[in-house]
Amino acid sequence: MDYKLFYWDLPFRGNFVQLMLEEVGARYQRRHASEIYPEHGLAIHNPGMAPPYLYECRSQTYFAQMPACLMHLGREYDRLPAPSELHTLALKTILDCNDVLKEITNNNGLLMWQKEPWEQFRSQRLRRWMQVFEHTGLAHGLKSGDGFLLGSQLSVADIAVTALFGTLLHCLPPLREDLLAAAPGIAGLCERIEARPAIRTFLQKQRGEYGSRYCGGQIEDSLRQMLG
C-alpha cells in the first residue's frame, strides 16, 4: 500500500488527488474523512483544517490541502514540467482550481446562492476563470483536439483541470455549454484526460456509484436550484 486518501463519499476536492493516484498507478486505499475529521484532525502529523488528507505509507507522513497533496504526488511520480517557470505555473494552475471551487460554492457555503448573484458569477467570474485556463493552454500549444495545458507532456496541471471541469460538467451538465463557449480547448483536454485508461475505469466506477453528486449538502442543493 502506497497511500491512504481520506475524503467524503463525494468527488469534489477528493477527485483531484484520486485522479492523480489512478493515473500514476499508485496503490492506495480510500478511507472516510470521518476517521480523522473533525475529532482527530489535530492529532495527525502536519494537521490540516479539513479533508482531503493524504497519508503516505512509506514516510508515514500526512499531507493536507489539496494543492499540497497534488504537488507532492507530482514530484514523486515525475508529473511536474521540468522548466522552473512551468513548475511554478503548474502550482499556480492547481491554486486557481482551488479558487474556483471556493467561488462556485459561494465561499465554501458561507452563503447559499441567490439568483442574481449566481447569474452574475456565472456570466462574469466563472467565464473569466474558464478563459484564464484556456489562455494558459493556448500559450503552450493546447488545441481542442490535441496537446496538454503546459506543453507536450501530461502534467499534474492537466489532472487538476480535468478534476475541476470534468467533474463539474458531469455533475452539473448545464455548465457544459459555458465551457464550450469560453474554453473549447479546455473542454477537449478534459475529454482526452478522462479517456485515459486508468482514469476512464475509475470514473466509470465512481459515477456508477455516486451518480451526479458533486459537493453535497445545502451547497449542492443551492447550485442545483440555480441551474434549474
Image: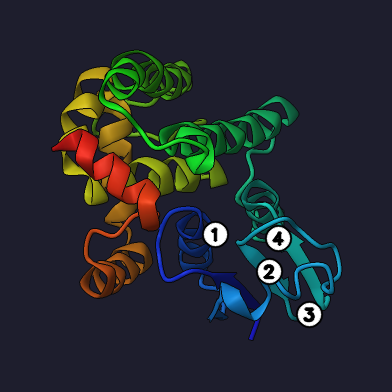
Q: CB of mark 4 within 8 Å of CB of mark 2?
A: no
Q: Earlier in the sequence, mark 2 or mark 1?
A: 1
Q: What residue is shown at x 67% (from left), y 67% (from top)?
A: 54
Q: What residue is shown at x 40% (from left), y 60% (from top)?
A: 11
Q: Using the rendered image of the protein, determine whether residue 153 is visible from the camera's viewpoint.
A: no
Q: Earlier in the sequence, mark 4 or mark 2?
A: 2
Query: Residue 144, image x and y in percent?
Result: 25, 28
Q: Earlier in the sequence, mark 3 or mark 2?
A: 2
Write down the residue under mark 4.
76
Q: Disc 3 vs disc 2: which is toward the camera?
A: 2
Q: Amino acid at mark 1?
A: Val
Residue neighbourhood size for the residue with mark 4, other residues' Cα within 10 Å, grouped as few (<14), some (14–19), many (≥20):
few
Q: Earlier in the sequence, mark 4 or mark 3?
A: 3
Is residue 68 toward the left or the right of residue 107 in the image?
right
Residue 38: mark in rendering: 2
Q: How many marks?
A: 4
Write down the residue under mark 1.
17
Is residue 119 toward the left or the right of residue 30 in the image?
left
Write down the residue under mark 3.
58
Front position in the image: 144 or 226 = 226
Q: Disc 4 vs disc 1: which is toward the camera?
A: 1
Looking at the rendered image, the quarter that the C terminus falls into is top left
Tell me the quarter of the picture where residue 173 sits: top left
Q: Is residue 89 above or below residue 75?
A: above
Q: CB of mark 2 within 8 Å of CB of mark 1?
A: no
Q: CA distance from mark 1 to mark 3?
A: 17 Å
Looking at the rendered image, the quarter that the N terminus falls into is bottom right
Q: Amino acid at mark 2?
A: Pro
Q: Amino acid at mark 3?
A: Arg
Q: Using the rendered image of the protein, determine whether residue 160 is visible from the camera's viewpoint.
A: yes
Q: Amino acid at mark 4?
A: Glu
Q: Is residue 88 above or below residue 69?
A: above
